[in-house]
Amino acid sequence: MKRIIFSRLATLVLGVLILSSCNSLSKMKKNAGTVKYEVNPEFLEAHAGKVQGTVKATYPASYFNKKAVVEITPVVKYDGGELALSSVTYQGEGVKENFEVVTYETGGSKTYSFNFPYEDKMLRSEMEVRVKAWKKTKAGDATDLGTFKIADGIVSTSELLVLDPKPAFVGDNFKRIVGETKESEILFNINSADLRNTELKKGEVKDFQTYVKAADQNPRVELKGITVSAYASPDGALDLNTRLSEKRGTATDKYLKGEAKKQKLSKASNSDFLSIVQTPEDWDGFKKLMEASSIQDKELVLRVLSMYSDPEVREREIKNISKAYTEIADQILPQLRRSKLIANVDLIGYSDEELVQLASNNVDSLKLEELLYAASLVQDDNKKAELYGKAGDKFSDWRGYNGQGVVYLKQNKLDAAKASFDKAKAIKDEAAVKNNLGVVALLNNDVKGAKELFSSAMGAGEVVNYNLGLISVIEGNYKDAVNYFGGACEYNAGLAKLLNKQTDAALATLDCVKNDDAKVYYLKAIAGARSAKNDLVFNNLRSAVSKDANLKAYAKKDVEFFKYFEDSTFKSIVE
């Protein structure tokens, strides 16, 4: 009999305990609304392709059962699916686990972080927390404490980056008109201005005459004129040397005029065709010849030239170096008693039309710079790439392969572009080529590789800064991006400033963008929403959707315009 009483009593106690247990979790469920959940930031934001934030749970006093374990799971819900994030678990002070403790008497706040990759379908989404609890262990069924919405949508303005890395193009050095000179010398005896037949008949003078006649007859050469530079050696009296240089110039001028008449040069009668320059004492020529000589004590002679500027003092001091002066008189001074003949011509290159024609019909006749320039003139990209490749193949010139790669980039032929840039790099490891290999890497989503290449290509100009600006936006380093973009009037430069919370500066940059692009207006509308300027929002949003109707659907979900979702004007624009 006693055993039966005991059994009933035990059952009764167990039932009370079970009821008490259920009631304790039931109480937590009943009062679940007193727990405050906050998300920071208020609107989740996508940066560097990820969404990061914190959830703060604040428990009131006398809420968290001492024997309870509570699990909170943040969930991102979007059209067509959801993403459950990592859960966080708290425990009452009577639970012997290793979770963070929330006390029953005082309650308190607990904050935990989340991080998940952003996807386009999450643009219009919600975040909620799903909460459940159990007693001591999770062996039994958990009690659902409720689901609580904590966020609307994800600000994804960073995803509006236009991935348009800039290649570095290195052009040609083609010059349509190239100056050229032809020189010859006529030597004179000491203290004489008489022209000697032996000088006039020597090979270099004959070659000079032949060159001048050929230049005059060539339609692609303009003979601009002939200059006579007449000299005397720096020995003897200055007045004597002055007269000598003048006489030598006059004699040479007379000779050349006679030859021009014989050759029937077309410009021979022009008053400025022949000009004379006299140098009474050719100390510059003397110094140059001394430096190139092997004369004994030449360093001592050169020191005299550097120490004294007065010609008489120079001559006296040099003559005092008697042994050296004898060699100077035999080897140096005779070469300074001369008239120098200088023909000045302009070589006239092919016209643009001729170059394009030759590129099509006789490409092998073109020189390197002509070929590179011709490639730049051709409109058809396939032909352009072919010509740049020809320049690389024929002349082993890195610019040819680099130009070919740039054309392939324009055609979105990334593999072909990389092959061309690799050929260019094999010839010369230029900063421009590194930049362009970085462009290929970035377009292939190799952000790390692209960053390394851009960083090593700083000598390739402003395009490198622009490309590093793109990398900085991708990585979420907006301050760096703003610095890299500098004062560029570019869409992405405006985006970087907007992401860096420089709204006014972003608007100034977007206002100077020359391209009448829908995305530019869309960013301006976002700037208007951030600064609560309704006219700026509506006017620019109208322009954006008029140029790209797809932006209507995007704007409807873009929480940058969350405050306008129920606005009638906003609705009229995006519907």
Image (cartoon, grey):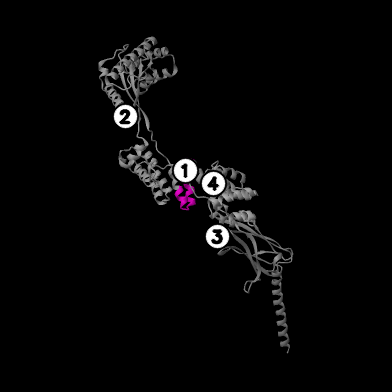
Residue under numbered circle 4: 491
Q: Residue at x 57, y 59 (%)?
A: 122
Work out whether mark 3 precedes mark 4 in sequence or the reverse, and give the earlier one.
3
Work out whether mark 4 precedes mark 1 in sequence or the reverse, and give the earlier one.
1
**Residue 111 appears at what percent x and percent y?**
65, 59
Separation of marks 1 and 2 at Cα, in angstroms = 45 Å
Work out whether mark 3 precedes mark 2 in sequence or the reverse, and give the earlier one.
3
> Is 162 included in the stretch rendered in magenta?
no
The residue carrying pointer 4 sits among few (fewer than 14), some (14 to 19) or many (20 or more) residues within 10 Å by Cα, namely: many
| Image quadrant where residue 77 sits | bottom right
**Residue 291 appears at what percent x and percent y?**
37, 23
Q: Which mark is residue 232?
A: none
Residue under numbered circle 2: 219
Residue under numbered circle 3: 121
Q: Is residue 229 above or below residue 135?
A: above
Q: Is residue 339 above or below residue 353?
A: above
Q: Residue furthest front?
A: 572
Separation of marks 3 and 4 at Cα, in angstroms = 24 Å
Separation of marks 4 and 2 at Cα, in angstroms = 51 Å
**Residue 320 appears at what percent x and percent y?**
38, 13
Which residues fall within the magenta stretch? 438-461
The residue type indicated by label 4 comes to Tyr
Q: Residue furthest bottom?
A: 1
Q: Secondary structure at mark 2?
A: loop
The residue type indicated by label 1 comes to Ala
Q: Residue at x 31, y 12 (%)?
A: 193
Work out whether mark 1 precedes mark 2 in sequence or the reverse, and give the earlier one.
2
Of badges 3 and 2, the one in the foreground is 2
Residue under numbered circle 1: 457
